[in-house]
């Protein structure tokens, strides 16, 4: 594994682009938009090409790529960033969604355009940093750094209750993160380093800490921060408000990427560092995940607001991810990671679609729509396609992820698999019912008759997402081949139980 | 060695230069007419620059000492009453920087208030002289006189807006409570003298070491500790000695509020560390419980009171009180007998970043002062982002730094102190502190909310003088740079921790 | 020179000091209060003399009684205070204050009784003729810097008084 600078380039390219964007003259808004699009597309190609770089094999286990520089000497904080199969695809997901966010905000953001795109680019840097950081301090640094741009995006560019939503989002996450800080500081005080590659072996060699009381408290400290982010029931109450009041681009990044920060953290740090504690606590965590799945689905079903429905569907889908992680099976965990990517694509696409509808009618209420399929056939086709992907129809991406998760859950405990599978049914319920009410049936509102169909820009935004949904559904091995090795490496540390030993060889 | 030596001259040169320039400002102010009063500011600035050069001279002497391979030892002057060690040099630079930024921010503010007199700058310089005595004093008398000089200068500066009733009231309250607490402080010092037979801090430490031996009646040292500590807690505005702070901060001219909250607090902390670490070192088992109680009370009182304030200056006064609580945790960290070096380092880092953050905040508030609007209500900040976007963004930076969000400077202050607490096993205190940090995020967000997400009350643009721009630029840059690249500043703090003379403190050598 | 009738003079002067102190706070007429304060200060000066500290006694009389108290009397007589000379001198919370004072006094007495052994049992060894010289030697050798800084303190106080009080500066 040769050291390279590509990780830092991919991390800080959006920030550099954002700083240059600030230098553009005020009023040259089209130039701002084009520059932002250029930077984000460039970032995507830079990130995507990492997967194909010669000499770096992501399908082997171990860190495929890392950079390790000294940053601060006292306390010893290093700039240690690492890419392996899991984080690579999350970085690429971020880079994939951001240009789409730029495209969707092309017309809908019309004042303070420069600040909007600057915040978007800074947010992209921070998000990428979270996924690649391997020094705990650096991780915390980037974790907190995502809060400010997101809170500003919601608060400055959002809808009616944006200030309430922004403050709630900020406070929830900030309060939960400080417990993680205490845990990180404890680890530093006892190991003298923040580096994951130092702390993990230390914990392995000190089983009295890792498996004992201290390990439990540390696990909980990290867990709380990630549980608020995912979000895990009952800490999810910030999510509907934040999602609904955020501007479309904000919602896409929030649902598509920010929530994955939590699940990534659960996998990498909670399970990676404290497998014994994770194993011991998995019981109630799985219960909460399943409650989240079912509760999210049931609440989504009764929502009158389209965006809130999609927001609660996020809660429901991410319950699957948590369930997959805490089953400690190779299938379940790989499915969880894959589901992270799926959810990014499909829910991101859903928010983009809802945003397009909002641009036309300035409302999210389902009752305001009806029979749109005849007016906007192309748009309706995309919407239905993405809905099917979100539900988990076979041949589309959702199916692969959910199936892997459920097979892992079933192997852990049959009841988990059964209840989780019911979640699939619930999600089909509310999504299809929503589609029926919005697109099919009678059009009661004359304003709907004049709505334009998807424009060229909008089609440009939706085609990549739909294509990904299909490709991820029919050829998941492209991704799973690089996800499986790091997943197995993480699971090797979890105390092997009888049902874990059977690696999911046939389900691929 | 009695008498006045050449070494004494060089070590007291920073103070002497400041005095000379202060006297000079007082004199040339008589020659200046109303429109050219800004020359006073230039003269004061020159004084600060010369004094900084003199401090740099002392720093070079330390560098020579290190180059010769000697262990770091402080320089004593004036028969051992003045002890200039690296710790003192750090604080000297801090006071000079704070005074310089204050002067930058004051000029236009005073012109608007129509109280632009030379005495203002002279008093700032005199108070810095007092602060230097507090930071470098090794003798109870010098520490006390330095404290009084700083305090009296500040009393006058707080009341400088002579026609404003709030300013008069603030000055009177501060004066009365300050004088009272100085009296209690002096009583404590007199007891310490009685126990030790000398006013030298090292002698007191040795005598207290004997007095604290098990089996001896400890009541008199305990009373000495409590009265001394009470006086000191007043100066740093710890709960329950904080009642003067919100009124004084609110009524004072905003630039002086900034100066008081930063330099005054730093000097009070320097004094507190001198006394608690050097003189009262053997009494640590007795004073840690007191500090724990006061720290918890301070964090609670400061944070909870700030939640409901509508006047920005009062809000930041309570936020200052809360920060004092966090700083105190740095002194608590450690065993019952020895302080944790990371804790002391945390205090120094915290004071360093706090200087810039808080001065920036009060600079922004001061720049809002216009002819008919005082500019210190929360509603005056409404929609600042639309009227003066750069200022609003700078203010947001300062607020986030105060709340301790990385990658800004304020995070490092809190980080070291929490690290020290966890290293020494005070988990409950650390958890309580982080909970309060989260609470504080709420009222800082309220201010940010007003600036960014509300509409402005009027459309009058905010004019900012070049001096204010310079001040805001320095504080803003410092907040961001220290946050992203703290290495040189952390090295500076590590350098200033070499306080090897006192054996109790020698283990702080890192 | 051996001291004469020391306990008698100590109790006598202390009694005057305490009674005058009480008079300061109970007298209605401010001029009477000020004069009572002067009596307290003079009796304290006498106590200092008994402790073989003629310098402090002299400074007490010259500066405190002669300078500061005269300033007090000037201000009192310049300001019209007929109203306050008829007011009751204690506010409504004097019960709480008396209790707090009693507690504090009890604490101090306890501290003194318990901690009596900790103070070195020193008799005054300096012949009183050298007291002032010793003070000045310390002041100008050991405490030179505080002495100079104290002069700055006085300057600042003067500047402050002018800034606060003068109509146009």
Image (spheres, coloured by chain):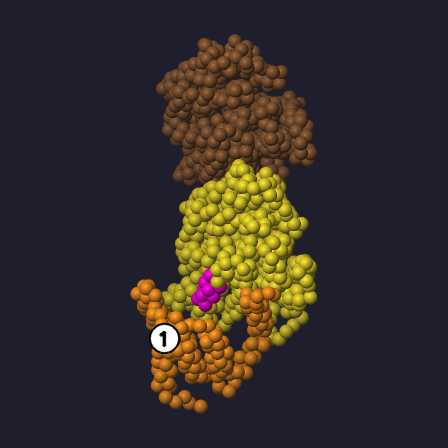
Above or below, B449 relative to B213? above
Q: How many marks?
A: 1
* Mark 1 element type: loop
Which residue is at the front of the view, B143 or A3?
B143
Dividing the picture into quadrants, the one containing residue B481 is top right
Residue at the location (38% across, 75% down)? C29
The reply, left or right, for residue B52 in relation to residue B176 is right
Is B312 inside the magenta-drawn segment?
A: no
Magenta extent: B173-184
Q: Colour of chain A?
A: brown
Dividing the picture into quadrants, the one containing residue A213 is top left
Residue at the location (48% across, 62% down)? B172
Above or below, A12 relative to B196? above
The x and y percentages for residue A119 are 59, 33
Local crowd at mark 1 within 10 Å, few (<14), some, or many (≥20)?
Answer: some
Which residue is at the front of the view, B274 or A465?
A465
Above or below, A12 relative to B352? above
The x and y percentages for residue A480 are 54, 19
Instruction: Output the letter for the chain in orange.
Output: C
Q: Main secondary structure of the magenta part?
A: helix
Instruction: Output the letter for the chain in yellow.
Output: B
Is B181 inside the magenta-drawn segment?
A: yes
Image quarter of the N terminus of chain B: bottom right
Which residue is identified by label 1?
A: C27
Residue at the location (48% across, 43% down)? B443
Above or below, B312 relative to A400? below
The x and y percentages for residue A155 are 52, 34
């Amino acid at each position: 594994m040769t050291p390279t600078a590509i990780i830092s380039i991919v991390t800080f390219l959006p920030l550099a682009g954002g700083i240059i964007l600030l230098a553009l003259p005020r009023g040259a808004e089209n130039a701002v938009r084009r520059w932002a699009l250029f930077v984000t597309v460039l970032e995507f190609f830079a990130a995507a090409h990492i997967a194909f770089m010669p000499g770096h094999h992501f399908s082997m286990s171990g860190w495929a790529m890392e950079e390790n520089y000294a940053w601060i000497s006292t306390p010893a904080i290093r700039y240690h960033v690492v890419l392996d199969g899991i984080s690579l695809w999350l970085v690429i997901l971020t880079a994939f969604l951001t240009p789409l966010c730029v495209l969707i905000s092309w017309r809908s953001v019309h004042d303070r355009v420069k600040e909007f795109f600057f915040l978007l680019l800074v947010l992209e840097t921070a998000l990428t940093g979270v996924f690649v950081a391997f020094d705990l301090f650096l991780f915390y640094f980037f974790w907190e750094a995502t809060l400010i741009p997101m809170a500003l995006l919601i608060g400055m560019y959002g809808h009616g209750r944006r200030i309430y939503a922004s403050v709630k989002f900020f406070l929830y996450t900030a309060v939960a993160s400080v417990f993680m800080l205490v845990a990180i500081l404890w680890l530093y005080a006892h190991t003298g380093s923040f580096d994951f590659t130092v702390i993990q072996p230390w914990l392995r060699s000190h089983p009295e800490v890792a498996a004992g009381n201290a390990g439990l408290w540390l696990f909980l400290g990290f867990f709380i921060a990630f549980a608020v982010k995912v979000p895990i029931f009952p800490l999810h109450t910030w999510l509907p408000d934040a999602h609904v009041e955020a501007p479309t681009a904000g919602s896409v990044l929030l649902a598509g990427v920010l929530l994955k920060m939590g699940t990534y953290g659960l996998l990498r740090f909670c399970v990676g560092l404290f497998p014994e504690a994770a194993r011991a606590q998995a019981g109630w965590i799985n219960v909460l995940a399943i409650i989240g799945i079912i509760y999210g689905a049931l609440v989504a079903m009764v929502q009158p607001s389209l965006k809130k429905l999609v927001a609660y569907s996020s809660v429901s889908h991410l319950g699957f991810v948590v369930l997959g992680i805490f089953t400690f099976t190779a299938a379940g965990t790989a499915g969880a990671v894959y589901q992270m990517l799926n959810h990014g694509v499909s829910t991101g696409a859903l928010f983009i679609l809802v945003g397009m509808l909002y641009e036309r009618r300035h409302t999210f209420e389902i009752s305001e729509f009806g029979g749109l399929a005849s007016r906007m056939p192309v748009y309706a086709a995309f919407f239905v396609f993405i809905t099917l992907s979100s539900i988990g129809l076979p041949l589309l991406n959702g199916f692969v992820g959910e199936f892997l998760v459920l097979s892992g859950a079933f192997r852990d405990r049959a009841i988990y698999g059964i209840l989780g599978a019911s979640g699939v049914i619930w999600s089909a319920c509310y999504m299809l019912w929503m589609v029926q009410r919005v697109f099919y049936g009678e059009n009661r509102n004359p304003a709907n008759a004049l709505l334009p169909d998807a424009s060229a820009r909008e089609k440009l935004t939706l085609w990549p997402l739909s294509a990904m949904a299909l490709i991820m559904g029919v050829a998941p091995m492209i991704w799973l081949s690089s996800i499986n090795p790091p997943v197995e490496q993480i699971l090797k540390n979890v105390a092997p139980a009888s049902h874990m030993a059977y690696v999911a060889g046939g389900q691929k | 060695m009695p008498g006045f030596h050449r070494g004494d001259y060089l070590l007291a040169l920073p103070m002497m230069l400041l005095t000379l320039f202060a006297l000079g400002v007082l004199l040339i102010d008589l020659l200046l007419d109303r429109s050219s009063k800004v020359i006073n500011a230039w003269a004061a600035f020159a004084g600060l620059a010369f004094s900084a050069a003199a401090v740099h001279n002392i720093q070079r002497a330390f560098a020579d000492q290190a180059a010769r391979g000697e262990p770091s030892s402080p320089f004593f002057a004036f028969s051992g009453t003045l002890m200039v060690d690296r710790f003192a040099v750090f604080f000297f630079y801090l006071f000079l920087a704070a005074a310089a930024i204050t002067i930058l921010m004051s000029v236009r503010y005073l012109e608007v208030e129509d109280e632009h007199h030379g005495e203002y700058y002279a008093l700032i310089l005199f108070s810095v002289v007092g602060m230097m005595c507090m930071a470098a004093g090794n003798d109870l008398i010098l520490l006390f006189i330095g404290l009084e000089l700083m305090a009296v200068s500040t009393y006058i500066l707080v009341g400088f807006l002579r026609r404003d009733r709030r300013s008069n009231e603030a000055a009177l309250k501060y004066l009365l409570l300050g004088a009272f607490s100085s009296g209690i402080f002096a009583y404590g010092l007199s007891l310490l003298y009685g126990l030790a037979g000398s006013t030298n801090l090292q002698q007191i430490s040795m005598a207290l070491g004997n007095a604290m031996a098990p089996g001896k009646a400890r009541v008199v040292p305990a009373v000495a500790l409590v009265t001394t500590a009470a006086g000191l807690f007043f100066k740093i505005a710890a709960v329950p000695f904080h009642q003067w702070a919100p009124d004084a901060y609110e009524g004072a001219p905003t630039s002086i509020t900034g100066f008081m909250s930063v330099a005054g607090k730093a000097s009070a902390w320097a004094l507190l560390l001198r006394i608690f670490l050097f003189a009262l070192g053997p009494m640590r088992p007795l004073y840690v419980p007191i500090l724990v109680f006061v720290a918890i009370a301070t964090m609670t009182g400061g944070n909870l009171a700030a939640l409901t304030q509508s006047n920005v200056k009062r809000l930041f006064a309570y936020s200052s009180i809360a920060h004092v609580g966090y700083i105190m945790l740095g002194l608590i960290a450690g065993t019952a007998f020895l302080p944790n070096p990371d804790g002391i380092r945390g205090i120094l880092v915290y004071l360093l970043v706090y200087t810039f953050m808080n001065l920036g905040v009060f600079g922004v508030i001061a720049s809002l002062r216009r002819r008919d609007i005082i500019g210190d209500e929360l509603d005056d900040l409404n929609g600042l982002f639309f009227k003066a976007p750069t200022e609003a963004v700078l203010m947001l930076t300062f607020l986030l730094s105060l709340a301790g969000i990385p990658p800004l400077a304020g995070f490092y202050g809190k980080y070291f102190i929490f690290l020290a607490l966890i290293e020494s096993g005070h988990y409950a205190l650390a958890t309580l502190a982080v909970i309060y940090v989260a609470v504080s995020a709420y009222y800082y967000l309220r201010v940010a909310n007003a600036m960014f997400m509300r509409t402005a009350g009027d459309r009058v643009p905010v004019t900012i003088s070049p001096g204010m721009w310079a001040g805001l630029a320095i504080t803003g840059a410092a907040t961001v740079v220290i946050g992203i690249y703290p290495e040189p500043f952390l090295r500076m703090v590590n350098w200033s921790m070499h306080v090897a003379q006192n054996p109790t403190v020698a283990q702080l050598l890192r | 020179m051996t001291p004469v009738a020391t306990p008698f003079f100590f109790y006598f002067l202390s009694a005057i000091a305490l009674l005058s102190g009480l008079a300061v706070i109970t007298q209605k007429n401010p001029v009477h209060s000020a004069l009572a304060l002067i009596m307290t200060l003079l009796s304290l000066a006498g106590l200092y003399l008994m402790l073989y500290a003629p310098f402090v006694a002299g400074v007490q009389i010259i500066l405190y009684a002669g300078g500061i108290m005269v300033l007090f009397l000037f201000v009192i007589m310049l300001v019209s205070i007929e109203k306050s000379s008829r007011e009751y001198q204690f506010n409504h919370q004097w019960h709480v204050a008396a209790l707090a004072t009693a507690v504090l006094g009890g604490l101090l007495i306890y501290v003194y009784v318990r901690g009596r052994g900790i103070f070195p049992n020193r008799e005054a060894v300096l012949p009183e003729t050298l007291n002032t010289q010793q003070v000045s030697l310390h002041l100008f050798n050991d405490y030179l810097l505080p002495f100079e800084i104290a002069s700055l303190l006085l300057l600042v106080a003067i500047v402050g008084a002018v800034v606060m009080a003068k109509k146009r500066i």
